[in-house]
């Protein structure tokens, strides 16, 4: 069993699209019982799986001592893939977590581990109490970053902050997202500071994921972007296997 967090200090880098696609691949291609846990109050992950935000916001309630997260899990149309949906009530979650204690998210994740083989956490952009608790709960943290000279700097800052707070933290996998090989700056970054990182190309089909409300791999499996996402997923599965074998 593994918990994979998709986190980024910067918004607009394809984080939620990546989270939904990877969760779908864990279920559809890996055959794993998979939970996509949407922690972003914008509820984008649920939207990409065809789920509408509930009329009564209640997602934050699962974090209370008497909360029942298992009862809030919803099936999706994709076999083996379930959703723990988000809503606007999560806007105050960092404040709630500071009051409930530094291990609250990890406690809920531990409860759900017996139900699922893979748990994918789609985190809101930024760094706060929620981010710190996600790091504590995760086995692997995937950080999508744009093709910018500042990406490596942002990654180094994140690593230093994690070491300052956690001393030991789960492996971090940076991903170069929204890459356009036609742009000289993108090529320069890919060959220098982001050399060796997994790459997800900019693709109009990726944008169609929000239009169709489906993971890319489900409706365009033969596309270039889907092939890159498939390689990323295979690499993540390999990392998880090595970690569990150690």
Image: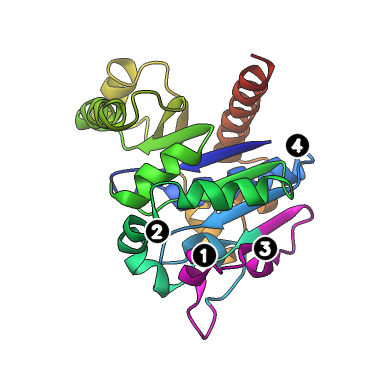
At mark 3, the secondary structure is helix
Q: Quick one: label 3 or label 2, which is nearer the N terminus?
A: 3
Are circles 3 and 2 on residues that touch, CB within 8 Å?
no
Q: Which residues are magenta?
A: 54-82
Q: CA distance from mark 4 to mark 2?
A: 35 Å
At mark 2, the secondary structure is helix
Q: CA distance from mark 1 to mark 4?
A: 33 Å
Quadrant, the N terminus? top right
Colour basis: rainbow
Q: Quick one: label 3 or label 4, which is nearer the N terminus?
A: 4
Q: Residues within 10 Å of mark 3 (few under 14, many from 20)?
A: few
From the viewer's perspective, tell me whether residue 40 is left or right of residue 50.
left
* Rendering quarter of residue 72: bottom right
From the viewer's perspective, tell me whether residue 76 is left or right of residue 132.
right
Q: Residues within 10 Å of mark 1 (few under 14, many from 20)?
A: few
Would you name the residue on which mark 4 appears?
30
Q: Residues within 10 Å of mark 2 (few under 14, many from 20)?
A: some
Q: CA distance from mark 1 to mark 3?
A: 13 Å
Q: Is residue 174 above or below residue 178?
A: above
The mark found on residue 65 in the picture is 1
Q: Say which of 234 and 37 sits in front.
A: 37
């Amino acid at each position: 069993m593994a918990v994979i967090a998709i986190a980024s200090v910067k918004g607009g880098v394809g984080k939620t699209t990546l989270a939904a696609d990877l969760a779908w691949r864990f279920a559809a291609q890996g055959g794993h019982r998979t939970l996509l846990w949407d922690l972003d109050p914008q509820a984008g992950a649920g939207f990409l799986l065809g789920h509408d935000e509930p009329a009564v916001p209640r997602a934050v309630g699962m974090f209370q001592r008497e909360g029942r997260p298992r009862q809030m899990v919803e099936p999706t149309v994709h076999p083996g893939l379930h959703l723990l949906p988000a809503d606007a009530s999560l806007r105050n979650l960092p404040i709630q977590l500071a009051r409930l204690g530094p291990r609250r998210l990890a406690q809920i994740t531990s409860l759900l581990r017996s139900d699922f083989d893979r748990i994918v956490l789609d985190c809101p952009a930024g760094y706060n109490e929620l981010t710190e608790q996600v790091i504590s709960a995760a086995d692997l943290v995937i950080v999508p970053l744009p093709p910018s000279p500042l990406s490596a700097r942002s990654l180094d800052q994140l690593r230093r902050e994690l070491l300052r707070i956690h001393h030991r933290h789960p492996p971090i996998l940076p991903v170069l997202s929204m890459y356009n090989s036609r742009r000289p700056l993108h090529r320069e970054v890919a060959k220098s500071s982001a050399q060796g990182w997994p790459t997800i190309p900019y693709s109009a089909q990726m944008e169609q994921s929000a239009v169709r409300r489906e993971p890319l791999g489900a409706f365009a499996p033969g596309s270039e972007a889907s092939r890159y996402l498939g390689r990323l997923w295979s690499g993540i599965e390999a990392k998880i296997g090595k970690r569990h074998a150690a």
